[in-house]
Image (cartoon, rainbow, N blue to C red):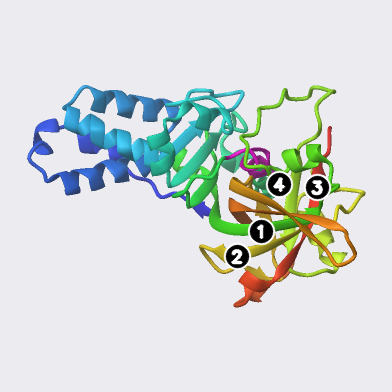
Amino acid sequence: MRRKKPTHSMDLFRHNNSTETLPNELLEQIFTQAWLSPMFPAQRATFIKSIFGASRTWVAMLARIVAKHVYVSSSPLNCESWSNNGWAPSLWHSLSELSVQLCHSVTRQIVTSPKPISDCPSSALDRLPRTAIRELFQNFHALPYIPNLRELSIEYLDPVDVNSSLTFRFSVIHLEVEYTFPSDTPSWLVDELGLTGKTKCRKARYAPWELPDLFHISTSTTSQGHLGDVLNLLPHLQLSEKSFGIKVKVLSASQYIPHPGFLLHGPLSAACMSISSEKAGYCMTVVRGRALGVMLEAGSKGRRCQNQAVTSREVYIFKQMVC
């Protein structure tokens, strides 16, 4: 968790004439610094409008920065956003293919209380890390594969002082994976876990006929003793009563995966499915593809796993409890 430092980015653009002669590379650095500085959603919208009134070069430059670093606002107290209200999957359906290719980070801004964060009780502040992870779960499993995405952030805005806002950052891992599961695994489960490569449809929230949100988390250990750490970190989840015998092998990863460590998996992209026969005549389905992943810091920290590409990981299925 990092506390953002105060900046005065809007002051950079009060005198347009002073920036017109700057090289494009330097101007883009200034725009990027301004865009990444702490701002309320309304201020961010005003900033965009001020650039739109300048040259086409400025507009094109800002458009690339906005697509690269996406900010989304969604809360009962403040629902202004430069692009869309809500996060996944509606956000990505509204972006162009070029925007998805450019995106490096996504920050969701939330106003949780009309009071300043400093006035909130300590018990509420202690719950924020878990609340941020829950917010991540509710959106991450519906995200498509975004090739350049590196970071997802949840930012709790202070309604009085934006510089006092709290931000929780999650590093995104790019994975090449291979799933193995019995061929009689229910097709609805394969679809819900995002293992078919198809875009997941948006669910009607709180509809009683809908399945609860399902998540799959893998670990390199076969012992279920560590699952208590996951449930302690994620009290809104419940471990599935049935083990479906799903395993996943990480063929490659953009960064090291700790051992033991808990890895939240996103839906597969460019999935390739095949069926192989075991010695006893029991058929297994093998699916390969690309996916995004997020490491969960649960329990004690592990060590780096050098041979992660040849290690089969156990997959555990969790469902979100309905309040």
List the residue tagged with mark 4. 127
Which of the two discs, 2 and 4, sits closer to the camera? 2
Q: CA distance from mark 3 to mark 4?
A: 21 Å
> What kind of secondary structure does the magenta stretch mostly adopt?
helix
**Mark 1 surroundings: few (<14), some (14-19) or many (≥20) residues within 10 A:** many
Image: magenta residue range: 134-143
The kind of secondary structure element at disc 2 is strand
Q: CA distance from mark 4 to mark 1?
A: 35 Å
Residue 178 - label: 1
Query: What residue sits 84% from the left and 23% below the top?
Result: 209
From where the camera sits, is residue 172 visible?
yes
List the residue tagged with mark 3. 318
Task: Judge left or right: residue 118 versus residue 213.
Answer: left
Question: Which quarter of the rendered picture does the N terminus lie within?
Answer: bottom right
Asked if the residue at tag 1 contacts the one at tag 3, i.e. Cβ–Cβ closer than 8 Å, the answer is: no
Nearer to the camera, 66 or 146 = 146
**Mark 4 surroundings: few (<14), some (14-19) or many (≥20) residues within 10 A:** few
Q: CA distance from mark 3 to mark 2?
A: 24 Å
Asked if the residue at tag 4 contacts the one at tag 2, i.e. Cβ–Cβ closer than 8 Å, the answer is: no
List the residue tagged with mark 2. 251
Asked if the residue at tag 1 contacts the one at tag 2, i.e. Cβ–Cβ closer than 8 Å, the answer is: yes
The kind of secondary structure element at disc 3 is strand
Q: CA distance from mark 2 to mark 1?
A: 7 Å
Asked if the residue at tag 1 contacts the one at tag 4, i.e. Cβ–Cβ closer than 8 Å, the answer is: no
Q: Quadrant of residue 319?
A: top right
Q: Quadrant of residue 9?
A: top left
